[in-house]
Amino acid sequence: MENLDVSRTLTTLADLLEIQGASPFRIRAYRNAVNTIDSLSRPLSDMVSAGEDLTELSGVGKSVAKHITELLTTGRITRLDEVSAEVPVTLVELVRLGGVGPKKAKKLFDELDVRTIDDLEERIESGAVEGLDGFGLKSVEKIKRSIEDHRKHTGRFQIHEVEKLIASVLEHVEAAPGVDEVRVAGSLRRRRETIGDVDILARCEGDGSAVVDHFVAFDGAARVEGAGPTKGTIVLHSGLQVDLRVIPARSYGAALQYFTGSKAHNVAVRTRAVREGLRVNEWGVFRIPEGADPQELDKEDGERLAGSSEEEVYAALGLSWVPPVLRENRGEVEAALADELPDLVTLDDIRGDLQMHSTWSDGKVSLEEMTLACRDLGYEYIAVTDHSQAMAMVQGLTPERAREQWVEVDEVRERVEGIRLYRSAEIDIMKDGSLDLPDEILEELDVVVISVHSFMDLDRKAQTERVIKAMMNPTVDILAHPTGRRINRREPFPMDVEAVLEAAAELQVAVELNANPNRLDLNDVHVHRAKELGVPVVISTDAHSPRGLKDMRFGVDQARRGWLTRDDVLNTKSADDFERWLSRRA
Ligand code: DGT
Ligand code: CA
Ligand code: CA
Ligand code: ZN
């Protein structure tokens, strides 16, 4: 069981207790523990099996430690079973919607027997909710919008969460009898930002059911949904579903191709096959026998042209091998046919990181520590972009403090060799489109990064105008996290991204692809559009600690999904070339 499984379970318990109206101190105890667990670098399961004292972790008290140990050793928490006998677990979903706090959820349950989001939707439709004490027209409207948002995200995990959850499952499958190779397919292999379920393939010539039996016995499985001769499905404690398929070597490439998807890509590939008189399925590529009805054929009928490797499968159809990140039916099959697939940017191409925070605002470590950490990653240049004064709750930089910071920048430049540290800041875009620091400060920065952190509820036209106006300031270099979205948490704010990108092209402003897996903003489709318009894209981590710098790879994956090559990404340039770009308006 992974730390995330534990923290999700404790969060559920805390939410249920809150709905029940338990003491805020108890609830706080669980939430504090969850915070600690989420930033823990070691597996709790190792600590428990080593007999370590969990109460030494900050925020973890005796009773929470007991719950964690119970969960890790037995797979359940007795207290959670007790509480969920009184309050339906599904109420937790209601609380996680915006606009329904724990008290309101309890009220909905007590008075209208609302247990699920579906129930809530139905009671709203019937008008029952609006009459309820504490629920006005406005709050009901808000709940309705939250339900819509929720529907879009339901059940999908973020990619970084899935990576953590799946590592031990893969190890477990690798240890299964007769397994020669294990690969991840599906949306995870395509590096989508969210994942519905994980698809795993195991190559094995022998008895598939032995592999499946081994798989479903995984100790982190909360439930087994199915176990057959070639296929098994489990659900982890976090709710993540994992499908395993056992495939013989002769079909392994074809199966990998098929189960990597996307569905739309597979349809386009199959259409291509049919045009060539061929048939492609998860067992291979076959020639359709003369006069045969394809509908009547058995899975492996016809002459086998390919199957053991993916390259072979694409080649048999006259296509170059398509990188999984491109398999979304956005023109990649045509490009593969013409041998014109883009040479995608890689993590190795990245030479600098142009958004991160230090203790001058909400970062965890000093300017110098961030600089050293970046040098360790092999970067040639960086911008430490602490917030500006509008972000008062994190001590955003005033003009005075900006100047003080430059003194420290100079000192760090003296002390740390081998990396160029730029004077920079992440400047807030004010409601009227002006910038949060005066021009005389902005003019003295090497890299000016701007972003929206407030008034995200402006209407689309006003928001678009505001952002474009901000970009018109001639000191501006990069528009950061342009749509403000938080994956699974906050929708992008209403804004005409097309108009903003056109303005960026005109004004020679670069746009950020924020690599934090909670943001990935701009997304794949938008960075593709930026590329088409000739707008440079910067992939930055927005790290608040050295650990956050490692998120760069998520940004690179998203950039690859947007077809970006090295030339499309500004921070692949050498330091000299990047500085030439910085002086483009001089
Ligand atoms: P997810 O799980 O929602 O994040 O997305 P995927 O792409 O992993 O989808 P999933 O798990 O339903 O199926 C994995 C792959 O299997 C999918 O990308 C393509 C293939 N596949 C599944 N069902 C079909 C189907 O009905 N037709 C075709 N052509 N391919 C399918
Ligand atoms: Ca999947
Ligand atoms: Ca699946
Ligand atoms: Zn920001």
Image (cartoon, helix red, strand yellow):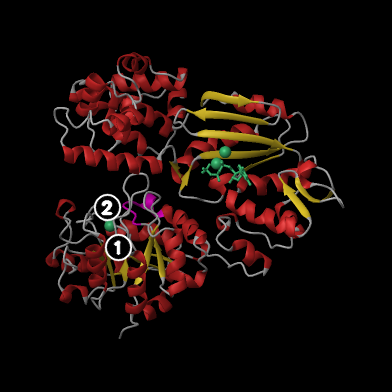
Taking the image as shown, residue 91 lies to the left or right of residue 527, namely: left
Vertical comparison of 575 with 133: above or below: below
Residue 60 magenta-drawn? no
Secondary structure under the numbered disc 2 in the rendered image: loop
The picture quadrant where one finds residue 515 is bottom left
* Position in image of residue 54 (x %, y %): 35, 25
Q: How many marks?
A: 2
Marking on residue 521: none
Mark 2 is on which residue type?
Gly
Q: Residues within 10 Å of mark 2 (few under 14, many from 20)?
A: many
Q: How crowded is mark 1: few (under 14 residues within 10 Å), some or many (20 or more)?
A: many
Mark 1 is on which residue type?
Val
Quadrant location, the C terminus: bottom left
Most extreme residue toward the front is 126
* Position in image of residue 523 (x %, y %): 42, 58
Q: Is residue 92 visible?
A: yes
Q: Who is closer to the viewer here, 284 or 367? A: 284
Q: Name the residue under label 2.
A: 363
* Residues in magenta, as a range: 542-549
Most extreme residue toward the right is 290
Residue plotted at (23% across, 19% down): 110
* Position in image of residue 21 (x %, y %): 20, 21
Residue plotted at (52% across, 23% down): 223
Q: Mark 1 points at which residue?
A: 384
Q: How far apart are marks 2 and 1 (CA)?
A: 10 Å
Vertical comparison of 466 with 356: above or below: below
Q: Who is closer to the viewer here, 466 or 184? A: 466
Mark positioned earlier in the residue sequence (2 or 1):
2
Q: Who is closer to the viewer here, 577 or 448? A: 448
Q: In which quarter of the image is ligand 2?
A: top right
